[in-house]
Structures are given as structure tokens and as C-alpha cells.
Amino acid sequence: MKTRSFFGGSPRAIVPDNLKSAVIKSSKYEPTINTNFERFADHYSMAVVPARAYKPKDKALVEGAV
């Protein structure tokens, strides 16, 4: 049984910044994700879509104001 179907509380996608603990190599088409972070996302059936460098439009408006 998938965790999301039971609890109904995990997001479908994660948009991390391009920090080294989440994204090893930033790329527009094929970013390299940290293996532990990728396993975490696979366990919860989530997609990891890193934010573009220098483009705050990918992140939430609240994070841009911080």
C-alpha cells in the first residue's frame, strides 16, 4: 500500500533549490539528484523538479520575500 493513498498527505512534486544536498549537478534537461534524496522521493511517490538557477519564479511567492 502506498503511503499517499493511505494518508493522502504527501505532495506529488518537490521543488528544491539547487543546493548540493539535494541537487548534485544542475541541468535544464537532466539534473543529477542526490541518491538519498531520490530514494526519499521514490518512497513517497514524489517527483523532484529542481528550481532553475537565478529564476525565483519556480519557488513560492512567500519564499521570494524572505
Image (cartoon, rainbow, N blue to C red):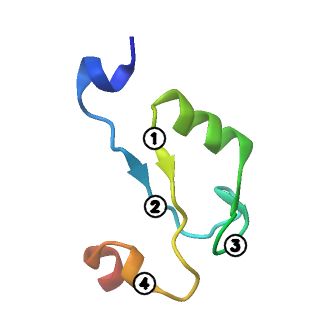
Q: What separation in Å lies between label 1 and label 3 (alpha carbons)? A: 19 Å
Q: Are marks 4 and 2 in contact (CB under 8 Å)?
A: no
Please tell me which residue is depicted at 27% across the width and 78% down the height of the picture: 61
**In this rendering, is residue 42 above or below 29?**
above
Label 2 residue SS: loop
Q: Which residue is mark 4?
A: 56
Q: Which residue is mark 2?
A: 15
Kind of residue sitting beneath label 1? Met
Q: Quadrant of the C terminus?
A: bottom left
Q: Are marks 1 and 2 in contact (CB under 8 Å)?
A: no
Please tell me which residue is depicted at 53% across the width and 39% down the height of the picture: 41
Residue 54, horizontal then vertical, whole percent: 54, 89
Kind of residue sitting beneath label 3? Ser
Kind of residue sitting beneath label 4? Pro
Q: Which residue is mark 1?
A: 46
Which residue lies most toward the bottom here? 54
The image's mark for residue 27 is 3
Q: Compare residues 47 and 64 and report the one nearer the observer.
A: 47
Crowd band around label 1 with a 10 angstrom C-alpha radius: few (<14), some (14–19), many (20+)? some
Please tell me which residue is depicted at 73% across the width and 42% down the height of the picture: 35
Q: What is the quadrant of residue 3 in the picture?
A: top left
Q: What separation in Å lies between label 1 and label 2 (alpha carbons)? A: 10 Å
Sequence order check, earlier mark of 4 and 2 = 2
Label 4 residue SS: helix
Which residue lies most toward the top here? 1
**In this rendering, is residue 9 above or below 57?**
above
Sequence order check, earlier mark of 3 and 2 = 2
Q: What separation in Å lies between label 3 and label 2 (alpha carbons)? A: 14 Å
